[in-house]
Amino acid sequence: MITAREFVEATRTFGFSRYTGVPCSFLTPLINYVINDEMLEYVSSANEGDALATAAGATIGGQRAVVMMQNSGLGNAVSPLTSLSHVFRIPCLLISTHRGQPGVQDEPQHALMGQITKELLALMRIPWEVFPSRVAAIVPALQRADAYMKQEQRPYAFIMKKDAVAPQALHKNPVPDISQRRAIVRTSHNPAAKPIYRNVVLRRIIEHTPVENTVLIATTGFTGRELFAINDRPNHLYMVGSMGCASSLGLGLALARPDIKVVVIDGDGAGLMRMGNFATIGSYAGDNFIHILLNNAVHDSTGGQATVGGNIDFAGIAAASGYSVCLAGNKLALIDALFALEPQAGPVFAHVKTAAGTIDNLPRPDLTPHAVLTRLMSHIEDVF
């Protein structure tokens, strides 16, 4: 058994300063130690997939990140692990507990995952080893993880057994207190207004997001492809796969780089898929985070099947989740109003009703996801 201090201080020497996760009793000592430390930053995520994406965003911003989760949560993280971290080549250190470990008595819900945890990581092509339980084993384990992540630019995992780390008391709350924040909600919906298309809204967003001080993250599907078709700029990131993770990725980047204005363009389907991240953003994001949700009430890129987005008050949800200002409407002027806002105490949100459909002969980005990311990271390093 080791102490949380012994492990976390060792990771600090390797440059890890950002932690995200969803608790497990096995992880309690590590999480508590990180939360107690004023120099480390922890994000309490709504689910494990969002934790992984937030860590990926922090990595893009230059912070090395550790993601902690129960092995049952690997199921929630499969999509971002395989279609975000793997495809874009974004490394992070993953610590997964081993609930339901064969031969160890545990709750019945952990039995199957306990049997397949190692195989699941191997199937996702994530190298792993058992979490070090001796002090002398910590640095060599981190050296192996560090070497792999630097060479392959992909995650490396530790599987933690029960009682690997000695108990550690918790002395503070990791969640910022936003109880006094009162969201400003403005709605400007005109039922007689001519429908606006996503392509038109994206063009207006581009006008308000100069390359010099803004990063623009577009959700997967037609949104990213249309953004690329209009103007492929070095401050763009076009998400592929990992549906719903654009906002959590943007959160990680915004936290790591408060000097950068991070603009996330979401869709109704993506927003619905990972709505828990609205609450995480509301609690943790600062005034450099702008969240725009384009709602055409359909899954446009898969044939136009309806979502329930037409029935949802996304601005109301954002307001209830802690965003500072929430705008809603179906007019293009909403985008102008959003970017004209004075700096706020927290993140801002816009829910824009759009028409379904896309441009003819819609292209796909002619750069690989990794090339797009590399370009963005070089741009951040050179400009900011």
Image: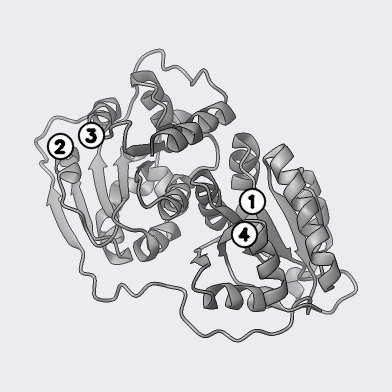
Image spot of residue 28 (x, y percent): 64, 77
Image spot of residue 67 (x, y percent): 62, 59
SS assignment at label 4: strand
Q: Residue placed at 30% from the left, 65% from the top?
A: 322
How would you rate the neighbour count of disc 4 (Cα within 10 Å): few for under 14, some for 14-19, many for 20 or more? many
Image spot of residue 69 (x, y percent): 64, 64
Quadrant of the image containing the C terminus: top left
* Foreground tag (3 vs 2): 3
Q: Earlier in the sequence, mark 1 or mark 4?
A: 4
* Foreground tag (4 vs 2): 4
Say what amino acid the circle numbered 3 marks. Answer: His
Q: Earlier in the sequence, mark 3 or mark 1?
A: 1
Q: Earlier in the sequence, mark 2 or mark 1?
A: 1
Relative side of 70 to 265, left or right: right
What's the distance in space between the residues labelled 1 and 4, CA to CA? 7 Å
- Label 2 belongs to which residue? 331
What's the distance in space between the residues labelled 2 and 1, CA to CA? 41 Å
What's the distance in space between the residues labelled 3 and 1, CA to CA? 32 Å
Q: Residue placed at 73% from the left, 79% from the top?
A: 3
Q: Is residue 128 above or below residue 293?
A: below
Closest to the observer, 344 or 271: 344
Dots 1, 4 in contact, CB < 8 A = yes
What's the distance in space between the residues labelled 3 and 4, CA to CA? 34 Å
- Label 3 belongs to which residue? 208
- Label 4 belongs to which residue? 67
Q: Is residue 220 visible?
A: no
What's the distance in space between the residues labelled 3 and 2, CA to CA? 16 Å
User: Residue 117's quadrant in the figure?
Assistant: bottom right
Most distant residue in the top direction: 361
- Label 1 belongs to which residue? 92
Relative side of 261 to 119, left or right: left
Say what amino acid the circle numbered 4 marks. Answer: Val
